[in-house]
């Protein structure tokens, strides 16, 4: 049950790449019992399972969300469950169902219960080949060519509709590719930038599914968590945007990332075999103008490319040495 004056948070997609680290960060801030982690099918890892409540929900079945929300008295949701770009091209119907019907269910549950706040991420996938690719503006052409991108644009519009029409305080950012050392991503086009660290650490070589010169916007997980929590904590009166903030940290191509890794592992070898994900990457921006996020809620990243690479290799190297990779 909700305790008077205490925020009760639910995280969907809590076993995923961002959800798993976000849940632990929220539990550290608000207390383990006040953050309900939910997943679809994946069993939570021991740290997630033992640090607070966990429940299974299927976001495309509204009653499964309602029963967990009502059981715990949830008043704030971080809706991280989604099908990403590459899986979305292989299973477009599933992407629509999870990303659109799932979001609609979450919005309706939140509206009916007059929740305090809801976070729903968008992505650089909201942009398309007609969007300016360098320093992509906050307000620009949104004509994505992937199903994932279509659901992200529709999701941004739907979230803003709920804000203006029903007064539901929905917030979101357009995440770039996220690089992390704890939970592997799944089904995205930017996943190479995580896989490469595991392969470099374990085997000293990697075959990249994007061309070596494909520049994409990226961000390290600590900055991703900081941005997510800071936007949710921001003063509503300062926000002119709500669900569609551009967000940036740094951009690089695979060959630039390889060169940075080679500063730590000189023998590391990378080969390139572009597949269907190349076309997706070619439709996304290279660099992002995130001045609205900086002005409206003080966004500023802590990590650049060299700092991120050093930290990733230190963390994975330690796990490898302990036989835990
Ligand atoms: C993907 O590659 O699909 C995601 C994203 C950029 O939203 N990481």
Image (spheres, grey):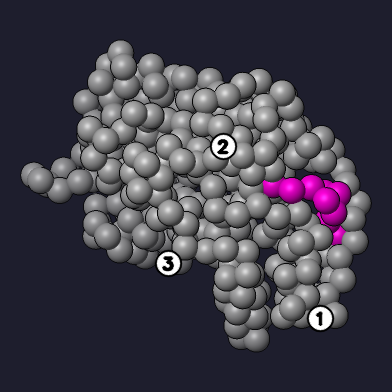
Q: Exactly how many numbered labels are in the figure?
A: 3
Where residue 47 is drawn, which disc sits there?
Answer: 3
Residue beneath the point at 34% across and 64% down: 51
Q: What residue occupies the far top of the structure in this picture? A: 165
Q: Secondary structure at mark 1?
A: loop
In the image, the segment drawn in magenta is 207-216
Residue beneath the point at 33% across and 56% down: 26
- Earlier residue among tags 1 and 3: 3
Q: Secondary structure at mark 3?
A: helix
In this view, the residue in front, 190 or 12, is 190
Quadrant holding the N terminus: top left
- Earlier residue among tags 2 and 1: 2
Q: Could you say which quadrant of the image residue 89 lies in? A: top right
* Magenta stretch: includes residue 247: no
**Numbered disc in front, either 1 or 3:** 1
Where residue 266 is drawn, which disc sits there?
Answer: 1
State the predominant SS element of the stretch in magenta. Answer: loop
Q: How many other residues sit within 10 Å of disc 1, few (<14), some (14-19) or many (≥20)?
A: few
- C-alpha gap between disc 3 and disc 2: 28 Å
Tell me the residue that label 2 is attached to: 123
- C-alpha gap between disc 2 and disc 1: 34 Å
| Image coords of residue 313 (percent x, y) | 64, 75
Residue beneath the point at 74% across and 63% down: 257
| Image coords of residue 129 (percent x, y) | 74, 27
Residue beneath the point at 31% across and 33% down: 239
| Image coords of residue 189 (percent x, y) | 72, 44
- The CB of the residue at mark 2 lies under 8 Å from ligand 1: yes
- In this rendering, position of residue 176 left or right of residue 228: right
Q: How many other residues sit within 10 Å of disc 3, few (<14), some (14-19) or many (≥20)?
A: few
**Residue 56 seen anywhere in this rendered image of the structure:** no
């Amino acid at each position: 049950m909700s305790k008077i004056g205490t925020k009760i948070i639910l995280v969907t997609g809590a076993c995923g790449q961002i959800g798993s680290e976000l849940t632990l960060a929220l539990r550290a801030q608000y207390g383990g019992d006040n953050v309900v982690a939910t997943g679809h099918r994946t069993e939570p890892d021991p740290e997630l399972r033992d640090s607070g409540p966990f429940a299974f929900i299927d976001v495309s079945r509204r009653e499964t969300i309602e029963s967990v929300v009502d059981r715990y008295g949830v008043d704030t949701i971080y809706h991280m469950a989604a099908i990403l770009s590459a899986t979305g091209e292989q299973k477009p119907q599933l992407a629509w169902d999870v990303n659109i019907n799932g979001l609609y269910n979450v919005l309706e549950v939140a509206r009916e219960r007059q929740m305090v706040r809801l976070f729903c991420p968008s992505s650089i996938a909201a942009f398309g080949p007609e969007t300016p690719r360098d320093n992509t503006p906050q307000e620009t052409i949104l004509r994505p060519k992937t199903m994932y991108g279509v659901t992200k644009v529709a999701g941004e519009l739907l979230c803003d509709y709920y804000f203006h029409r029903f007064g539901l305080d929905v917030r979101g950012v357009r995440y770039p590719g996220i690089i992390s050392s704890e939970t592997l991503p799944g089904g995205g086009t930017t996943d190479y930038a995580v896989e490469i660290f595991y392969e470099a650490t374990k085997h000293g070589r990697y075959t990249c599914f994007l061309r070596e010169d494909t520049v994409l916007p990226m961000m390290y997980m600590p900055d991703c968590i900081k941005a997510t929590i800071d936007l949710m904590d921001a003063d509503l009166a300062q926000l002119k945007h709500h669900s569609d903030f551009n967000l940036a940290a740094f951009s690089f191509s695979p060959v630039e990332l390889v060169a940075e890794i080679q500063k730590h592992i000189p023998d590391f070898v990378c080969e390139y075999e572009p597949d269907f994900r190349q076309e997706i990457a070619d439709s996304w921006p290279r660099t992002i103008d995130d001045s609205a996020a900086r002005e409206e809620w003080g966004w500023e990243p802590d990590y650049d490319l060299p700092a991120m690479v050093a930290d990733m290799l230190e963390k994975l190297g330690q796990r490898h040495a302990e036989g835990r990779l």
